[in-house]
Amino acid sequence: MRKLLLVGLAALFLGGLVMAEEYTFYIVSHGGPGDPFWGVVMKGMQDAAEMLSKGTGDTIKATYLGPAVYSITELVDMLNSAIAARPDGIACTITDPAALDEPLRRAIELGIPVIAINVPDPRPAGERIPYLFYVGGDEYLSGRKAAERMLAVRKPTRAVVFIHEVGHVGLELRAKGFIEVMTAAGVPAEKLAIGTDPTKAVDIIRGYFAKNPDTDAIFTLGPIGTLPTVTFLKEQGLAGKVMLGCFDLDEVTLKAIEEGIALFTVTQQQYLQGYLPIVWLYLYNKYGFLPANDILTGPGFVDSTNVAKVEELIKQGYW
């Protein structure tokens, strides 16, 4: 009986080797590989491809494309290059639905499975790009939860959101959620464009505070906005006096939490935004499996209670 079982297993194993297949997937994003946030996404992507290749006997190839500097034009060009390769699946950030609508619909019509990551198409179901599902944080909910977290500490006199990429759907939704909650609580709140140049951003922030000295709550939408904000707060002696909530992780943000300058940062667990799309694209191609709903990887929070643990995981590339 044991011999027959062994023979059967051997036949199954050899059959699996004969039936091994190769799959090619792309992640196309608005963020460049040099950005620490997207470096974590890339690690997730690579780990998933390696895990699947070792565990299934199939060969999984995964490629990441993203412009070094934020550019919708370059993002579309890279997406078109990925489509031209006729891969077995594409995961893409929908940072500009109007610009990405045509190429992604074309990819879908060609039979290429598409998953949205990081930023979904916010339009109604009948208008949005018909991708399979979304993997990422809920940007609007994240903004709301950030405001609620600040209000739980104390009610600010005035709040402001610093946005570094105007028009970026994800950033706009974060700001919208935050401002709505603050406004509903009776706190004047608005959005201020500060750009991506840290030196110019500090000047813009300085000018805003000169006109609105009663501002005592700031929400930044990413490390690009957090750096000049922390610089300004230290420069003006306002560190710890003005409530600061951040988004995403980097060394400046973590240090700001440790030093009591920032209350928290909102996380998306972006490792999963690279890992899960590759796993699901493989499962969809191989077996036709799909999740029942979008997969939310955030909002999560890092604050003084868990920042030390997160720092250790950052060293390992998981945050």
Image (cartoon, rainbow, N blue to C red):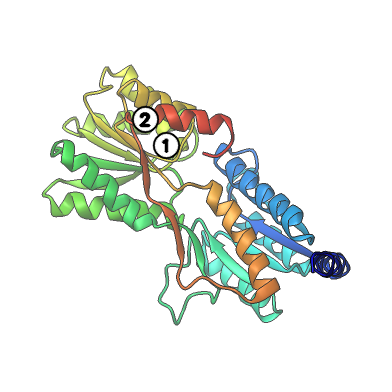
- Residue 167: give x, y in percent of width and height: 44, 56
Give the SS element for disc 1: helix
Outermost residue on the left side: it is 186
Please name the amino acid that badge 2 sits on.
Answer: Thr
- Residue 158: give x, y in percent of width and height: 17, 39
Residue 174 in view in this figure:
yes
Q: Foreground: 75 or 260?
A: 260
Considering only vertical position in the picture, is 312 above or below 187?
above
- Residue 314: give x, y in percent of width and height: 53, 33
Considering only vertical position in the picture, is 75 above or below 267?
below
- Residue 61: give x, y in percent of width and height: 77, 56
Give the SS element for disc 2: helix
Q: Foreground: 134 or 165?
A: 134
Quote the CA–CA distance across marks 1 and 2: 6 Å
Q: Foreground: 51 or 176?
A: 51
Q: Foreground: 286 or 24?
A: 286
Outermost residue on the front side: it is 1
Please name the amino acid that badge 1 sits on.
Answer: Gly
Which residue sits at x=79%, y=64%?
A: 2
Left or right: residue 66 compared with residue 54 = left
Which residue sits at x=22%, y=40%?
A: 150
Q: Quadrant of the N terminus?
A: bottom right
Any mark on residue 225, and which? 1
Q: In the rendered image, which residue does mark 2 sit on?
A: 229
Crowd class of label 2 (few under 14; some 14 to 19; many from 20; radius 10 Å): many
Q: Are marks 1 and 2 in contact (CB under 8 Å)?
A: yes
Any mark on residue 170, and which? none
